[in-house]
Structures are given as C-alpha cells and as structure tokens.
Amino acid sequence: MPKKLTKRAHVILPVDLVSDIDKLVGKRGRSAFLTELAQREIKLRRQREVLRETAGAWKAENHPELAEGSAAWVRQIRALDTQRFEELERRREGK
C-alpha cells in the first residue's frame, strides 16, 4: 500500500490535553490519534451540512406507504417476501 502524503503542521494544544492524549495513545500515537479525530469530525460536519441543505426535501405526502410508520412498512415488505418465497417453494415442489 502506498504511503499517504503528509504535511507537518504546528498545532498548539493545552498541556493537560497533550498529557491526556499521551496517556491514551502514547507520545508516538499523537498524530494518528489526532488525524483519526479530525477525519471523524470533518465527516460529521459534512453530513450535518448536507442535512441542513436538504432539509424539507422529504415530503410525507410523497410516501403514503409510510403513513403508519416505517416499522409497519418494513413488516409489510417482509411479509410479501415470505409469501413470495413460499410461493416459489410450492412451485419448485410441484404443488
């Protein structure tokens, strides 16, 4: 696997925070730890932004199948799958 490009960045952190990070991951694990946290936070912020941008796009009137709730709809779909499977089994057995 090719090595990812990296860039050294000067970051100032409170002493007690660095100490807590070191207790968790050790001095040699700081960069990986902070990289993982930063990537996770970026992903969350991007997801939140998309949610804000698309707010109101879902209209209940466009999805009448969910009027009784998504759990009821899932049960209905699963029941149809079960019926279809049983029908296929009967055909396969020649009944």
Image (cartoon, rainbow, N blue to C red):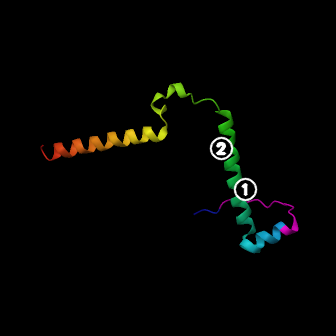
- Give the CA separation, mark 2 to mark 1: 14 Å
| Residue type for callout 1 | Ala
Q: Is residue 7 shown above or below 83?
A: below
Q: State the count of labels.
A: 2
Residue at image coords 70%, 65%: 32
Residue at image coords 87%, 64%: 14
| Disc on res. 38 | 1
In the image, 22 versus 95, the foreground residue is 95
Q: Which residue is mark 2?
A: 47
Q: Quadrant of residue 88?
A: top left
The kind of secondary structure the magenta stretch mainly shows is loop
CA neighbours of label 2 inside 10 A, class few (<14), some (14 to 19), many (20+): few
Q: Which element is circle 1 on?
A: helix
Q: Which element is circle 2 on?
A: helix
In the image, 32 versus 92, the foreground residue is 92
Farthest-out residue, front: 68
Residue 12 is covered by the magenta coloring:
yes
Look at the image and give the residue range highlighted in magenta.
4-16
CA neighbours of label 1 inside 10 A, class few (<14), some (14 to 19), many (20+): few
Q: Quadrant of the C terminus?
A: top left
User: Where's residue 60, x and y in %?
Assistant: 54, 28
Q: Is residue 21 shown above or below 80?
A: below
Residue at image coords 71%, 65%: 33
| Residue type for callout 2 | Gln
Is 11 left, or right, of 86 in this rendering?
Answer: right
| Disc on res. 30 | none
First in sequence: mark 2 vs mark 1:
1
Q: Is residue 87 shown above or below 37?
A: above
Asked if labels 1 and 2 touch by Cβ distance under 8 angstroms, the answer is no
Residue at image coords 85%, 69%: 16
Q: Quadrant of the N terminus?
A: bottom right
